[in-house]
Amino acid sequence: MSFRTRLFLGILVAVLLPLGALAYGVRREMERRLTAEYEGRVGSMVEVIEADLATENATLGSRLAALTADLARNNRFRLAALQNDASSRQYLLDYAGGAMSLSGLSMLQIQDSAGRILSSGHFRNEFDQFQPELPRLLASTPATMALVRTRTPEGPLVALARVDSFRVGGRRFSVVGGIGAEARLVDRSARTGDLSVALVYPGAQPEPPSGARVLRQLELPYLDLLSGAGVTLDTARFVVTQSLGTLEALRRSVDQWFIVAIALTVAVALVLAAWLSSRISRPLRELARKTSEIDLDRLDQSFDSERQDEIGVLSRLLGGMTERIRNSSARLREAERRAAVGDLARQVNHDIKNGLAPIRNVLRHFSQVAGQDPGLLPAVFEERKGTLDSSVEYLETLARNYARLSPTIERTPCDVNAVVEEVLRNTVVDGTALRTSLSQRLPRALGDTLMLRRILENLVGNAVDSLEGRSGGAVTITTEPAGGDGEPLTVRISVGDTGSGMTRKELDHAFDDFYTTKTEGTGLGLSIVRRLILDLNGTLRVETEPGTGTRFVVELPADPAWPAS
């Protein structure tokens, strides 16, 4: 992800997160305050209902007390109820209706001690019917008040009723009176804004609709005289509900405004982020382009800037860094040139020493023969002349290669066994056995004879040096074919010794330039061996164990024309 994109997204997040937090906080605070407001209103409404119930109960009680007092003194009621006076019978039947109208009641009936209805004001034809449970259950309710569902000529009536009683002639009579609950209580506080009050009783009213939630319920005892299964005490409820329509509309309105605000903010943030990121990234891209074109061969980039901000400071820092790199590059190239010259000089010295060693040995042999038997010099000269010619040719080839500073590899078929034998003839040992095991079916190696000779001279010389001071030591050189059966055919050359071997630390550094454990060594022998083998597309493996010896295994590609050649 580019810096411009990250800056762009960072500005958007920095703008949207606070706005989203504000939207969430405002919405949550709005709901909390509305809920608290509704709770307060519901509490007030319930207090009003409870106060109305208490007021109606007291009013109903006083009216029933007045009626019972009047009936206790009424002689015509006495004659009709106690003496069954026929002339007073009509008066008794009409009494409840007249008294109900005068008292402002919606329900009124008079019953004897057996529960027989003597007079009914709300439904006149109920006289002589028995409802003994009604006064008994009303008397058992708290404050002797309950909701009673009864019939009227116009339809069912739900009344807030209570019972009172009086005695006439030693007999007890009950007076049940009530007022319409829905007309007096529910309709008066039916709806206040989003709040509504409903009277819910079994088998008559449904539960509040799904679009509203119940906030508070006020329970009252309930008697249903129309159930047909006997009168039992049940429960009715005044239910205060809240319509969710207004709250949902408010939520939608707030959400819409916040969506509009977020959309506008995002649009402004997009424009601002695009402008700002472009303004910042343009000079940075230019700096990146100039920086990408810098290398050790091209340090002429100019980072001059007149800007005084951070980008100007960065430009000047890059300019200073480029100048330092330019100076360091010049010093580094001079140091590399000197190191290359020194490395070349050491390598030339090492290779010339290897080429001069056979000549020195031949001259030493001539001196020894001249001192002991001068007459044998011609014969010894003829015998050792080949060694001198081979060594001189070797040095001349080295001289030609070093004159070019980049030796040309002549990949031609090489007789590995012949090179091994030549190297061994030029190797002088004192007390060290040189053993060979050369395969007669060895394919020719595809490489360079001079490079192969340099590899073997270094490996054999190191093997002989490792036996210095150890009597009875031996150096063994073996050649054999390797590979085949689907694998590339190679020539394997092994040079092993019974010397002191190498530790793990010595093996880790054995091929490093200038690393040596010899007093007068240059530390280039194995390093040259490794480079020459890699140039010939070969491989090198070392097997060593301290106190036992070391074995170097070289594998070179075989001539693909073998054995047809």
Image (cartoon, rainbow, N blue to C red):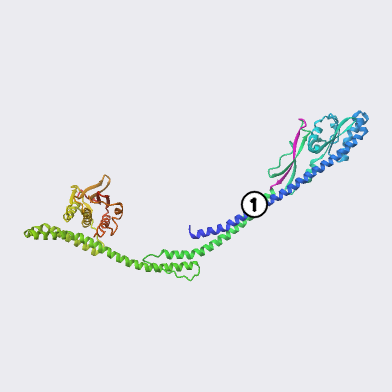
Q: Position of residue 449 (x, y in %)?
A: 21, 56
Q: Quadrant of residue 294?
A: bottom left
Residue nearest the observer in this picture, 108 or 64: 64
Other-residue count near label 1 (Cα within 10 Å), few / some / many at <14 / 14–19 / ≥20: few
Name the residue rendered at 68%, 43% in the picture: 210
Callout 1 secondary element: helix
Extreme-left residue of the structure: 375
Figure label count: 1
Q: Give, as a three-letter code, the residue at label 1.
A: Arg
Q: Main secondary structure of the magenta part?
A: strand
Name the residue rendered at 53%, 63% in the picture: 276
Q: Is residue 459 above or below residue 63?
A: below
- State whether residue 200 appears in this view: no
Q: Position of residue 307 (x, y in %)?
A: 49, 70
Residue 89 part of the magenta segment: no
Which stretch is magenta?
229-244
Name the residue rendered at 78%, 46% in the picture: 48
**Which residue position is annotated with label 1?**
28
- State whether residue 70 appears in this view: yes
Q: Position of residue 235 (x, y in %)?
A: 74, 37
Q: Is residue 119 above or below residue 15?
A: above
Residue nearest the observer in this picture, 507 or 483: 507
Residue 237 part of the magenta segment: yes
Q: Position of residue 494 (x, y in %)?
A: 23, 50
Residue nearest the observer in this picture, 338 or 11: 338
329 with respect to 534 (left or right) = right
Q: Quadrant of residue 161?
A: top right
357 with respect to 57 (left or right) = left
